[in-house]
Image (cartoon, rainbow, N blue to C red):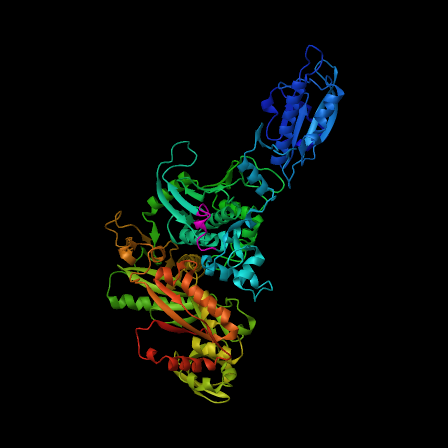
Amino acid sequence: MNKPVEVFEHPDKYWAFLTAKSDNDFEGQYFDRKEAGRIEVNGFVSKGQLDGIRDEIIGCVSAFANSNKNGGLLVLGISKIGEIKGIDHLREEQLNSLCNLNNYLQNHTTKVNVHDCEDETGQPKKILFYFVPFNPHSICETIGTNPKVWLRQGSQNIPMTPNQRDQLRRDKRIIDHEMEYCCPYDPRDLDQGVLQEFRKGFLTNNGFNNYTDEELLYQIGALIHQETPNGYAFTKAGFLFFAANPQRILSGSYIRLLRFDADYGNNTKRGQTTYDKSFTGPISKQIRDLHAFFRDSAFFKTYQKRNAQGSFTEEPEYPLITIDEAIVNAVAHRDYVFGLPTECESYKNAFVVCNPGRIIQRDKDVPSQFSLDTTILVSTPRNPKLIEWLKFVGDTQGTAFVRALSEGTKRMSAEMAQLSLPAPSYEVSESQTKLILFNNAIEREALHRAVVSGLQASEYANLFPLLIQNNRDFDTNEISQPGTSEKIELEFKYFLAALKDALMAKGWYVDKFSFSRIIAHRLGSDINIPAKVKNIVRFYPAYIFQIRKYWNHYFLCLDYTLEVKNVRNLQMLIKFPEFVKELIGKRAIAYGSSWRPCRILTITDEWTQVSFEDFNQEIQLPNNKIIPALSKEAMARLLTLEGIDFDIHRAIKQHSLALEPAAAKIRSEKTIFVINDIAQDIFPIFLEDKVITLDTVPLILPRRSHFENNKFYLETLREPKVEFNQNQASEDVRDGITKYGAYNSTPKEIELIPICNLSVRQQMTELIERLKTGKYKYRGSERTFSARFNYRTIVTVSSAEQILAECQRLIAENPGWQGNSKLDRHGVNPL
């Protein structure tokens, strides 16, 4: 696209463009051209004509200055069909009146230049150029008590309506919509969960730790001083972010999720919705709830595809990261003046986010349609306070919603590209921005049907077939010819022993070995933990190998686990006498000619008697050559005795994937990776006259309705409905408990008698508020259990030792409390 400033400075280079034979080839959002009137009988241009030309110039200049980041160019003296008419027929005073725009317009920096040229017959002519730079800080309008202002839309200069003018003032930051008055401040309107999470994240890096809620909210711009009973009022941004129900006043400030059984963009009616759900509350809760909904539900499809190793993996309909980025950007950048929600529309072939307000850029205009593979977006906040505040709250895993907005669109494109999907595209109007993600559904579903047809399945078990080769012939999936179970079990035992030996030969350490399973990890593969902790304990990602037999077929079952090992030898441990008695009779590993498992019999200050069970041998070894196997509780005590602050139990949960919401998927990915590795590195295994290999494709589980005669099949159980208050039922427990309340929710009043140290009085207040209002996913006690907490005061004491005495004093002063189980009084002590 030609840039107005370049055409203005070098018109001769763009002469063909300037003299295009049709206005359609020249005029548009950034260019306009007009004749300078026509000579009348008296040989001059009339005053009426001149006034009309000037009015058109004024409207065009105002529109360019208000609308175009790249400015605009108006050419005077060229006709609609590209003829050079010139301005030579204008008298000097007429030309001056058309050049001196400051008499008619304010807040513009228009540059005017007269250019000498020749018409089609070679006659010299002059034409007039107006280059109009964008005014980023004010509105270009006529001078007077009732100023007029224009907006450029394509090749038209449109007079602005009051609403458009207000929107322009907001977009240019002439007025700060976020800091405008919203409503009187009432502490009961606050969502305490959001406020406390924000306080925790924000105050870590700022010096406001002693601020009350009101002082904190005022300092960040969520409150303003106002003549109200408590002296504060919510700003619009503050109410959106911190109020538990901002939709009470800002009715359109929510996210609506819809699904249509139609294609997007086929110019046909989309029909009725097949799904319609609203996400309300403070904006961070809306994002969090929608994220959790997409993660936990089956709203989007999952496709199967064959990978390079020949096995099958699942591929989401859309990258969840891209969906998250689209939602966060929509909530952070939308225009909240519009009384409309952000609408997320799911079609057969696309996911569309419709956002009130035109997307804005700091240094350019975006076209009405574009794609992120051709247009780079630069983060230009419409709501800078909301964006800043979102940096201090995060999703259920603690990841901040906003980290680097300028990288958000790049990441969206990259994630789509990984699934071979088109880059996100946009459709932009003056009042709405649409983000469209296409899913290539036709091609992917065709491939998916081919995969399912070939496999006759859609799900798999954690069972990988063992294929048996005989030196003379082949018996697929049968470990032996029909024979007694004793013979088969004997071969099964030998196979596990051979598998253990093969693992050890290839750099695996066998943690446990029994008749039915092996637990092993790769040597040197310990998980990274703090160095001071690593000197005492080690975390190893390990795997459980088990053999399963179904209908005379054998399978390898593999699952991820975590092995936690003590690495302190006995010489280091006996300095703690409490460990010595505990270790007698416990397992250990000891070094004789090699490291072998043993059991501790007796311990002295220098030597220890151990028993090697696999060799039925007892031997005496130095304490520094024995490493006992400690329980998790013993390792936790050892860390404490060494003065190391480390929550070993939480670390175990973390690295064993117990804290991961998508643990099953992660385990599956780990299993597939290891199976493909050992199939090449460990197998084949030679056992007597048989060679055993491993199939890397897991056992197929077809749906029963399709394959009635299959011995392995899958049935889907319907989610049971849960009954809530007033006989309301829902399959969604989280939604039901917060919408209807508990099953038995008879209203009740509970009086609290809080007792605490003076230093934690504020934390006590916050604790009670959290109990009352709840946090994030769940409403508080009043909504969920119909239990209203109240308290007269918080009793403070000077030390923790005085709390018991204070309780005894209260009971002594109120003898009626003793033994009365009907009293709804409960002490709260955070210590």
User: Of 265 and 236, which appears nearest the observer?
Assistant: 236
Residue sitting farthest toward the top? 41
53 left or right of 213 in image = right
- Given residues 482 and 820, the one toward you in this image is 820
Q: Vertically, is 126 above or below 670?
A: above
Relative depth, front residue between 633 and 18? 18
Q: Is residue 250 magenta?
A: yes
Residue range corresponding to the magenta coloring: 243-254
Q: Is residue 747 above or below residue 325?
A: below
Q: Position of residue 458 (x, y in %)?
A: 34, 49
| Quadrant in the picture for residue 266 | top left
User: Can residue 477 be seen in the rendering of this structure?
Assistant: yes
Image x and y of residue 597, in percent: 43, 77
Q: Nearer the viewer, residue 151 or 9?
A: 151
Asked if residue 404 is positioned above or below residue 113 in the image, the reply reads below
Instruction: Based on the picture, tell me whether residue 812 belongs to the magenta stretch.
Output: no
Q: Is residue 433 above or below residue 708?
A: above
